[in-house]
Image (cartoon, helix red, strand yellow):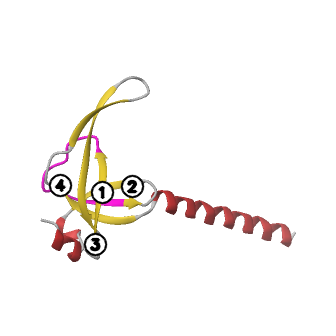
Amino acid sequence: MKKIIFWIIAFITIIGVAGFTFYKVNYGGTDYYVQILKDGKKSNETDDSGKTFHMYEYEEKAFDDRGESKNIKFNADHNLKHNAYLKVTYNKKKGVTNWEKVEKSKIPQKALEHLK
């Protein structure tokens, strides 16, 4: 009985670790900070049902918490406010997987030195 319980716990642990690793590889990444200084490039997209919607593409220089830069591309469903600061998560496989608005005070000093 103890062997069965051991193997069940081992199996659940392996599945958990594999799931966490898959998530980190596909959706995790490095945080970069960017300041929006211009409008995004507007494009019209069509979903599977034929409905048209607008997307705004941004190509910006972003900085990590060590002040190292990376040129990144990301999309938004609306035109972002000028001078807004964003924290973007960049994944080597998928590019930008997430972005969120942040206050200037929350940006690491080395990144902030390079932003306008």
Amino acid beneath label 2 = Gly
Write the start and end of the magenta stretch as one range. Answer: 76-89
Amino acid beneath label 4 = Ile
Q: Earlier in the sequence, mark 2 or mark 4?
A: 4
**Are the residues at dot 2 and dot 3 in contact (C-beta closer than 8 Å)?**
no
| Figure quadrant of the N terminus | bottom right
| Residue at numbered disc 2 | 95
| Residue at numbered disc 1 | 72
Asked if the stretch drawn in magenta spans residue 86, the answer is yes
| Residue at numbered disc 4 | 36
Q: Is residue 2 above or below residue 42?
A: below
**Are the residues at dot 2 and dot 1 in contact (C-beta closer than 8 Å)?**
yes
Amino acid beneath label 1 = Ile
Amino acid beneath label 3 = Glu
Per the image, label 3 sits on a secondary structure element best described as: loop
CA gap, disc 3 to disc 1?
Answer: 13 Å
CA gap, disc 2 to disc 3?
Answer: 17 Å
- Neighbor class of circle 3 (other Cα within 10 Å; few <14, some 14-19, many 20+) is few
The quarter holding residue 106 reads bottom left
| Residue at numbered disc 3 | 68
Outermost residue toward the top?
A: 50
Per the image, label 4 sits on a secondary structure element best described as: loop
Q: Image check: 12 left or right of 53?
A: right
Q: Residue at x 45, y 62 (%)?
A: 28
CA gap, disc 2 to disc 1?
Answer: 8 Å
